[in-house]
Amino acid sequence: MSQIDVREAVTRAHRAEWARLVAVLTRRFGDLDIAEEAAAEAFATAAERWPADGLPANPGAWLTTTANRKAIDRIRRENKRYDKQREAQLLSDDDPPEPLGAIEDERLRLIFTCCHPALALETRVALTLRLVGGLTTPEIARAFLVPETTVGQRITRAKAKIKAARIPYRVPSATDLPARVSGVLAVLFLVFNEGYLATSPGTDPVRQDLTAEAIRLTRLIRTLLPQDGEVAGLLALMLLTEARRTARVSATGELVTLDEQDRGSWDAALIAEGHRLVRERLAARVAPGRYQILAAISAVHTSARDVRDTDWSQVVALYDQLVRLDPSPIITLNRAIAVAELDGPEVALAAVDRLEPKLAGYHAFHATRADLLRRLGRSQQSRAAYDQAIELAGNTAETAALTRRRDQLG
Amino acid sequence: MQYLVSVIDATAGLATPDEMAAIDVFNDRLVADGHWVFAGGLAAPSSATVIDNRGGEAIFTDGPFVESKEYLAGFWVIQAADLDVALKLAAEGSKACNRKVEVRPFLDE
């Protein structure tokens, strides 16, 4: 096996085994800090040893054994009087057979602990990417454009709080589960959205590393909770969005809106998978949550071969359903965009204008107004709205597209 | 594990009879379910005295050590297996006393 193959094997093992390893170690040692450090050391050792010694027959078991030893080494270093009997017990428990269900359960515990509501949202995101996703602190810092020390402190403080306040390491009870799952999905959706439309001018407009990581973790949750409609809905939404990724930014680095995208370049496999999930949820005949409705809207869009074939009445009906669940101004704004296609830009503009007190600081509000005003031939007002949108937008590809549209006004 | 559940008030008002009744019901439940350690309501912050005896001679100062709009109005000390249990109890406590509460763990042994 070549060096490159071995390096790839280490990367593959990292993707496949990291969360399981951290979860199993946390369970065994009752300490996230020890678990994370030991897992990281085990992978570092693998990167060093595998090229020389060859790939172990069972990489997962090799990593577990190595990480286990690293953890015990650390405990020994920190506490010389560590109970010898307990140590012996841990050593003899080196590689116990674990049924698949139990492993899945371990990873689920880890995710729920990382996304505990007693932690701040940005902390949950950092902790989930670090402990479940296996991203390094510098990688997380780059992803969210915050200093490495800030991410490091967030993670350290979170681990200290989990320990001191005894945030439990378990899957929540059935009564708490729906609320807690939705907390986990909120974290994953945030990671995905930041990748899909990066909010800052200092980074690539689309961050595939983040969208891919969010999808990977949502797939993991889906295998763990296959019956949960919102998990399926969020996964479908991510897949149908990701399918359009390459069509979303033009060769000149401009964001391309849905109506102007080259639909032939959409990823057919991702769309098929997303549609399958949406159909599965429709067949379940359970009232859908917001992710399922958003996925259904995305499914309507991705079913149209040409933008003119879009079933806009279906889109508006789905938005109506969404507004009943979540009457937020952003949902109302997105509904108005669909209304413009169904009832014309004038009706839509009236609905958009009513949102001004709430959305005056949001670039998409001004961009939507600008577009509707342009279609109504009110160039001067449209130009002013584009100016405001450009000033507020942070994403470089979006700014470029808005600037071109403004400059094309007659 | 023990947690301090602090009752945060901003209105300087004592509990109303309805609130007192709800607190009593909640306290009885804490006792019945084995969560009760201790609880008490506090008199107004203006009744506080700060003492500093680090310098050899005790100095007494009238009033609370920190002036703020929100202050500690009372507290529970509860016994709970973990933070999830403590948060659930604290949420019930907040409803009973009709005020915000803060949960903070005691240092573990």
Image (cartoon, rainbow, N blue to C red):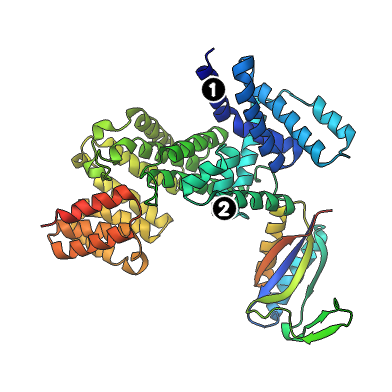
Q: Is residue B9 left or right of residue A339?
A: right
Q: Counting residues from the N terminus, which is met first, the one under dot 1 or under dot 2?
A: 1
Q: Residue furthest left?
A: A410
Q: Amino acid at mark 1?
A: Arg
Q: Quadrant of the N terminus of chain A?
A: top right
Q: State the residue at coordinates (54%, 37%).
A: A221
Image location (x, y in percent) of residue A302: 30, 37
Instruction: Give the residue number, with chain letter if any, for mark 2.
Output: A150
Q: State the residue at coordinates (30%, 50%).
A: A398
Report the chain holding disc 2: A
Q: Which element carries disc 1, helix, strand or loop?
A: helix
Q: Quadrant of the C terminus of chain A?
A: bottom left
Image location (x, y in percent) of residue A156: 65, 49
Q: Which element carries disc 2, helix, strand or loop?
A: helix
Frontmost residue, A67 versus A238:
A67
Q: Amino acid at mark 2?
A: Thr
Image location (x, y in percent) of residue A257: 26, 45
Frontmost residue, A127 versus A46:
A46
Q: Residue furthest top?
A: A1
Frontmost residue, A391 versus A331:
A391
Q: CA distance from mark 1 to mark 2?
A: 31 Å
Q: Which mark is residue A7?
A: 1
Image location (x, y in percent) of residue A381: 18, 65
Q: State the residue at coordinates (73%, 42%).
A: A31
Q: Is residue A191 visible?
A: yes
| Residue B101 drawn above or below residue A63 | below
